[in-house]
Image (cartoon, coloured by chain):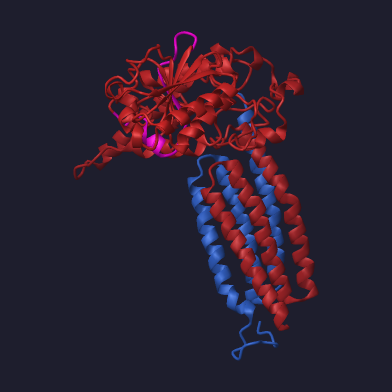
Chain colours: A blue, B red
Amino acid sequence: MIPEGAMFSEGATFVDMVTIPVVAMLLAAVLVAAWRMVHGPTLADRIVALDMLGVIAIGFTAVAALLAGHLGFLDVGLGVALFGFLGTVAFAAFVERSARAPR
Amino acid sequence: MNGILDAAAAVLMLLGAGFVLVAAIGVARLPDIFIRMHAATKAGVVGVGLLLLGVALSFDEAGAWVRVLPAIVFLIVTTPIAAHALARAAYCAGAQLWPGTFADELSEVIPRRVQRLDAGRPQADEREPASADPARQKTASEVDPMTILPFDGRSTAERHMPATMRTRPDTGLRRLLVGLAPGDAGRIAIDQAVRLARETGAELVGLSMVDVPAARRVGAVPLGAMHYARRLSEHRLHEARDKAADVVSAFEVAAAAAGVRYEVRHEEGDPRTLLADASGSFDLVAMPAYGWESDGAEPNGPGLDPLLAAGVRPLLTGTPARREVRHVLLVHDLSQRAGQTVRWFGQTRLWPNATIHVAGIGEAKPTMDATLEEAAAYLGAHGYAAEAIGPMPQSSVAADPLADLPFRCDVAIIANAGSGGRLQRLQADPGRRLRDARCTLVLG
């Protein structure tokens, strides 16, 4: 998507300029959250990290929508948010139930 | 798209990505799951929300807003629900609390499984009715909400404040941490802490620590022996955890028998950092004089110096008093730090029936007399019988510091023990020198 009211001669907008840093930050966030997911001492820690990864994924879909110039990616983000929520709640129920179960 | 909208979108996106990155770092770095969740949910949602807003702004189409706004609302609505469910589940499953945690409002409200140290061991540390303490006999459903509140009438807001921030005209000792370590010194520390908690009604927290890298260290390995080295290090770690589990059970038996309010936490990491992090929220930290850094087998370790250097203070150590405490020696080195210790002691009001003898270190000077008199007057104002006894004789400092005193000292409080200076000779090695002094020691 090349916007017409560009401020620079090459046609680069501020948004184009920040896309790379934004993607880099999101990637760094993925790495850091994945570290916790691998190391997390308990299952609940891993779930928190998974939730975080889901949130980052929504960020990625937003950036992807921008880069592709296609709004459909935003719908994908909504779907990711929905499934992330369901997944976290299901995992929480699982953790709680297995904690309550008689040994 | 006009330039201002474009710039605003860029700023929002950058901010959003920054929040997401900070949230991810928080998830990785924060100390316990409940605090981590805090980063993931709050900062994460703000970050993604800003990012989505930025993207919608840069599209600047109705279609983008129609997708982005519901997504943001959905996130804001669902994330707290998911976090709540997960936090509750983690609590039930016995996730460790950060040692610096002040309030555990769910304690005895929700049944909680305490993390098992050793899967093969029958569990004695369940927070459920099985314990010998009558206050813990009730099941979660029949606990009267009033009994969950603290008995000392503090408000909730007050209990959430760090111990050091509370205004305390008449506080007393409220939170006591005991470092659980194997060996004789470890047993003595537990004994001492449990007694003190029973006398003062303080809340007792036992912190069990396993230093995983130290436990796994096997030294240099010859070529080709890596397999055996790995097995050895696994074995050592297993042994260390096993020992920690033993000490935890011993602590629980002792605390339950004495009927004190207690709590156990297990942490893996460097004991120095763990204790330094935790000590800020406790009024006093009871530690074995030696053996806390290893498996307790090593009486010639570094003693408590590393802990004092790490800022863990005041430390309670030495031998528990076998009779009622009548004479307390307070060794003052005229430093500001020592003044803090005097204040701390006056405010915690330990051993209220004892006579406090305030002694100085160094040669006798008018300034010393004035400082000691002032300290004695301060303690007098807090209801103690206190007297300034001038400088401690140098000879007695060099030999057994407590032998030449005109009274039998039950408790010695050594102010400013951490920073050396004038007290260096007295506390050169508190672990080794003073643990034979047959009195309770408080290192301020």
- Compared to residue B12, the image places residue A93 above or below, namely above
The verdict on residue B204 being magenta is no
- In the picture provided, is B294 more to the left or to the right than B122? left
Direction left: furthest residue: B222
Q: Quadrant of residue B126?
A: top right
Visible residue check, residue A3: yes
Quadrant position of the N terminus of chain A in the picture: bottom right
Q: Work out whether residue B149 or residue A91 is closer to the camera in this orientation and state it.
A: B149
- Residue drawn at x 65%, y 41% as measured from the top left: B86
- In the picture provided, is B396 more to the left or to the right than B90? left
Q: Main secondary structure of the magenta part?
A: loop
Where residue B353 sits in the image (x, y, percent)? 55, 13
Q: Bounds of the magenta span?
A: B301-325
Where residue A40 sits in the image (x, y, percent)? 51, 44
Q: Work out whether residue B177 or residue B169 is closer to the camera in this orientation and state it.
A: B169
Direction top: furthest residue: B323
- Compared to residue B80, the image places residue A68 above or below, namely below
Where residue B156 sits in the image (x, y, percent)? 71, 33
Direction bottom: furthest residue: A9
- Compared to residue B100, the image places residue B113 above or below, namely above
Where residue B191 sits in the image (x, y, percent)? 46, 16
Quadrant position of the C terminus of chain A in the picture: top right
- In the picture provided, is B406 more to the left or to the right than B130? left
The verdict on residue B306 being magenta is yes
Number of numbered callouts drawn = 0
Visible residue check, residue B211: no
Q: Work out whether residue A4 or residue B172 is closer to the camera in this orientation and state it.
A: B172
- Residue drawn at x 78%, y 72% as measured from the top left: B63
Q: Work out whether residue B301 or residue A70 is closer to the camera in this orientation and state it.
A: B301
- Residue drawn at x 62%, y 51% as measured from the top left: B40
